[in-house]
Amino acid sequence: MNSQTTSQLGTLYLIPNTLGVYGTDGAQDTLRAVLAPQVVETTARLQHFVVETAKVARQFLKAVGTHTPLQELQLTELNVKTPDAAVKDMLAPLLAGHDVGLLSDAGCPAVADPGARLVEAAHAADVRVVPLVGPSSLLLALMGSGLNGQKFAFHGYLPIDAAARLKEIKRLESESKAHAQTQLFIETPYRNMQLLDTLLKTLNANTQLCVAADLTLPSETIRMHRVGEWQKRLKQGQGLALNKRPSIFLFLA
């Protein structure tokens, strides 16, 4: 138990980032479109941030319009390579009574994101954690898919090795069929088309497959068909261009 009372500690705010930039005013238009005023107002008053990538965070904070000049803000990077000891050190401002914002490069921090390590450390130190409402590509994709939202699982990236990937897809399909579970996963955007091709060649023709790309953007695309229907439409020239577009893949057997 921390010797300090909770009232003496700062609060860790989990700040959602946008999923992309669009509009005549770029990031500012995106903020107004997808982030609640409370999120912008809370972020604007903070001076301490733990971020995934400093460059991306500065672009976001510039669009927010922070009360403190951008160059005076304290930004500390936290990524998959950050040592555990360094994560613990990031609690220092919170233990000194300062509020801190945790910011991912896109979407909600600490969900499929290294920021979860700081949240875990904050709880261990009795620091108050406040998640703010914002866009989650995983939940938006699930909402838009029409697939089972009562039971689902996110699996991150599938194996890169072709044989291992094929085996994992078949395993996930069997699991989905046995438990009526929607399976979600992602891919590096430039490999999206290869993954879609593999899914269409591997999954059962009756399995429902959804692809959600560019969520929250004007170019947003959400398509859900059974695999057999996907194959039919592709032959008719009704394919889906996914190259370099952030996408979520979902299926239900």
Image (tube, grey):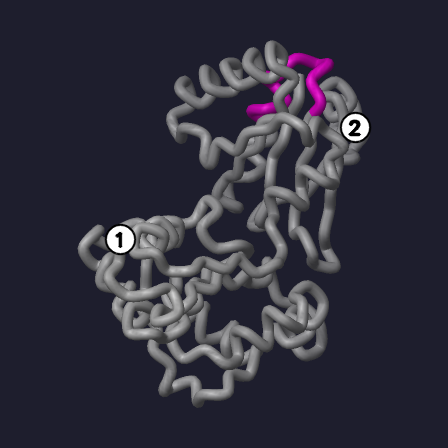
Is residue 114 visible in the rendered image? The answer is: no
Which quarter shows the C terminus? top right
| Residue 208 percent coordinates (x, y) | 71, 23
Magenta stretch bounds: 197-208
| Residue 142 percent coordinates (x, y) | 67, 37
Vertical order, 202 against 235 (above or below): above
Q: Which image quarter: residue 96? A: bottom left
**Labels 1 and 2: the sequence-earlier one:** 1
Say which mark, if any, is on residue 24.
none
The amino acid type of the residue labelled 1 equals Met
The amino acid type of the residue labelled 2 equals Arg
Give 86 or 56, whichever is nearer the viewer.
86
Q: Which residue is mark 1?
A: 1
Vertical order, 183 against 247 (above or below): above
| Separation (CA) of disc 1 from disc 2 | 60 Å
Q: Residue at x 53, y 19 (%)?
A: 172
Say which mark, if any, is on residue 233.
2
| Residue 71 percent coordinates (x, y) | 37, 86
At numbered mark 1, what does the secondary structure look like: helix, strand or loop? loop
Q: Residue at x 42, y 66 (%)?
A: 11
Give 221 or 134, whichever is nearer the viewer.
134
Q: Residue at x 61, y 14 (%)?
A: 179
At numbered mark 2, what does the secondary structure look like: helix, strand or loop? helix
Q: Residue at x 71, y 77 (%)?
A: 24
**Residue 131: in magenta span:** no
| Residue 7 percent coordinates (x, y) | 39, 69
